[in-house]
Image (cartoon, rainbow, N blue to C red):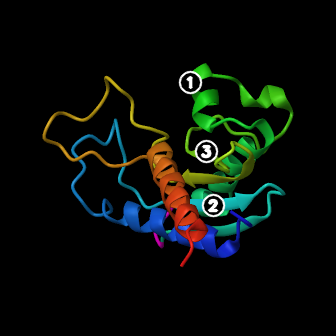
Amino acid sequence: MKKFTWQIADKVAHAVMEKSEEDVGKKNLSPDLQSNAPIAVCVCGLNFQPKVTLGSENAMSVSNDSLCEDKAYTVLRTGVPTLYWELKEVNMRNFGDQRFTGFAGALPIKTARGKMIGAIGVSGRKSCLRKGKMPIKGEPVFLQDHELAEYGLKIFKQLVSEKSQPK
């Protein structure tokens, strides 16, 4: 991959938005365990210049304005998915950076060789699905922030592998 462009970031962000839209409006029988709310997504490069930030029409304003970007920022500063901080139950205020967040929903974007080149952050739903606390069998399972970020990473890898193949 030569360069992580805004065009790639845009395709990733739109794919995540479209995936989340599949759930919006469906009946949610387990609102305490999962959410099918509208989302916001941020895809950014290493210098934390957001390449693309998108928000669903009805996403909460905090999601549109900052949380998805703060999640991506946290990944860029720490190099690890935000799920790590949530599972460790770390008090992020101890870091002295108001933008740090311990909510799952952001992942590093890396090259095939493992070099971090950006991050993707998703907000608006619950942070992640919890094993052992899944909806009852037969109920729809909606992707949460962490799983939507994983989906975005999968799309990124597909786009990069397509881009690197000769035409």
User: What whole-number distance in Å separates the C-alpha atoms at marks 3 and 2?
Assistant: 11 Å
Q: Number of numbered discs present?
A: 3
Q: Is residue 55 visible?
A: no
Q: Mark 1 against mark 3, which lies toward the viewer?
A: 3
Q: Residues within 10 Å of mark 2 (few under 14, many from 20)?
A: many
In which quadrant of the rendered image does the N terminus lie? bottom right
Residue 115 is situated, as x and y percent measured from the top left of the image, at 74, 45
| Amino acid type, label 2 | Cys
Name the disc covering residue 87, or none. Answer: 1
Q: Secondary structure at mark 1?
A: helix
Residue 77 is situated, as x and y percent measured from the top left of the image, at 80, 41
Q: Is residue 153 visible?
A: yes
Q: Which residues are magenta?
A: 57-61
7 shown above or below 34: below
Residue tagged by mark 2?
Answer: 42
* Comes first in the chain, label 3 or label 2: 2
* Comes first in the chain, label 2 or label 1: 2
Q: Residues within 10 Å of mark 3 (few under 14, many from 20)?
A: many
26 shown above or below 81: below
Residue 120 lies in quadrant: bottom right
The residue under the point 61% across, 20% down is 88
Residue placed most toward the observer, 15 or 71: 15
Q: Mark 3 against mark 2, which lies toward the viewer?
A: 3
138 shown above or below 94: below
Residue tagged by mark 3?
Answer: 107
